[in-house]
Amino acid sequence: MNCNTLYVNNLNDKINKNDLKVSLYVLFSTYGTVVDIIALKTQKMRGQAHIVFYDASAAAIAMKALKNTQFFGKEMRIDFAKTQSKMIERIYGSEPRGPLKRSREDADVDTEDAGLLKRAS
């Protein structure tokens, strides 16, 4: 399967999330335009990341070049993601069924605004 998103696992889970994202960006952006990096520190997603490239061929080149590379003391395992990133679906015009997940900050702001509207009524 050839898609724009790479699934990377066996990452060092002791690295700060922001440091990990920056380091992954620096490493993978040498192969093409990186649109997004999803790296969560939840129990289930610890040690994993999704790297979203603008171009599928750049993702394939990066995967081939970096597979089994040592990264923060661990050997990365890289494969194509099972599904396409919603970001790429939006860029190329095939809209996803629902909106992209909102960040917690956006959700908090909307909740606060809704509360203000109720009080004002």
Image: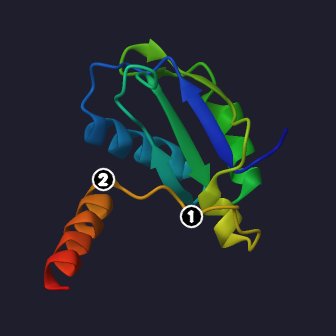
Q: Are marks 1 and 2 in contact (CB under 8 Å)?
A: no
Q: Secondary structure at mark 2?
A: helix
Which residue in the structure is indicated by mark 1? 99
Indicate left or right for 106 with 54 as reference. Answer: left
Residue at the image position 57 percent from the left and 60 percent from the top: 33
Query: Would you place residue 31 above or below residue 79 in this image?
Result: below
Q: Name the quarter where the C terminus is drawn.
A: bottom left
Query: Would you place residue 13 above or below residue 93 in this image?
Result: above
The location of residue 120, given as percent across then percent down, is 15, 85
Q: Residues within 10 Å of mark 2 (few under 14, many from 20)?
A: few
Q: Is residue 31 visible?
A: no
Q: Give whichever of 89, 62 is nearer the camera.
A: 89
User: What separation in Å lies between label 1 and label 2 (alpha carbons)?
Assistant: 14 Å
Farthest right residue? 1
Residue at the image position 41 percent from the left and 47 percent from the top: 26
Q: Name the quarter where the N terminus is drawn.
A: top right
Which residue in the structure is indicated by mark 2? 104
Q: Quadrant of residue 102?
A: bottom left
